[in-house]
Image: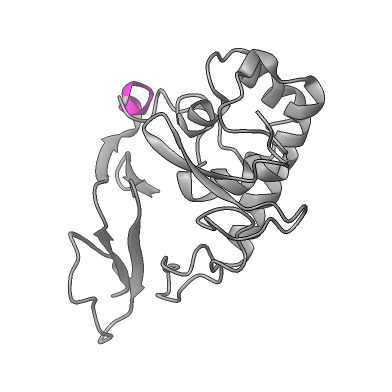
Amino acid sequence: MPAEPGYTLLMNLGMGADMVRFVPEGPLPPKYQFRLDLQDGTGFTIKFWWFGYVHLVPNDELHAHAMTRVLGPSALDPELSPDDFKRLVRRGRGMIKPFLLDQRHISGIGNAYVHDILFRARIHPKRSIPSLSDAEIDALYASVRDVLGTAIVMGGAYYEKDFYGHPGGCTAEHWLVGYADGRPCSVCGATIRKIKTGSTSSYICPSCQAL
């Protein structure tokens, strides 16, 4: 967000945070690490769950900011076309899940939602990128937009808060395979499994997402 004179405030909520607005004479959260007061008496606080940052950067130095200059395009950028997405993916090597989570390739996809993204596209998280067909990458692009877009409409996950302190509407019932170990797949009935994928765990349908 722009700040005067000639500065931009950069915020990264890391693995998650509560960024909540407050009003004059209104209550403040009991715990927070950052508070910004605006001239009209309103403002917001940030309670980081694990890590994150708030940086005030001169506008003429934004291009050199170490943490943002390496970010890939937003997964929901309206200008990111299916062909652009395909070109991004084709540059990658190794497994598709770590690629999607690497913010240097494409930003905005987290581990909480990547399980359903891959499931909707019928792609196993350990699939190698060179093995993906153009049709599978197109399905992945559509799935990214669908899963993240739906999550935004629902206000995020139930353990998250929006800017006004309201909890999100996405609960375990809305996730198709994410965090549903042992539950039957809603498509084929196979048992959803939790597997290790590098440094993270993944939830898959072994039938719909055959490796």
Q: Quadrant of residue 199?
A: top left
What stretch of residues is rendered in magenta? Answer: 60-64
Left or right placement of residue 26 versus residue 69 in this view: left
Left or right placement of residue 6 versus residue 178 in this view: left
- From what the image shows, is residue 62 above or below residue 188? above
In front here: 110 or 67? 110
- From what the image shows, is residue 110 above or below residue 73? below
Q: Residue at x 45, y 74 (%)?
A: 167
Residue farthest along the bottom direction in this orientation: 25
In front here: 8 or 51? 51
The x and y percentages for residue 47 are 25, 62
Left or right placement of residue 146 versus residue 46 in this view: right
- From what the image shows, is residue 141 above or below residue 205? above
The quadrant the C terminus occupies is top right
Q: Quadrant of residue 26?
A: bottom left
Q: How is the image coloured?
A: one colour
Q: Residue at x 30, y 24 (%)?
A: 66
The x and y percentages for residue 97 are 53, 31
Q: Residue at x 59, y 38 (%)?
A: 75
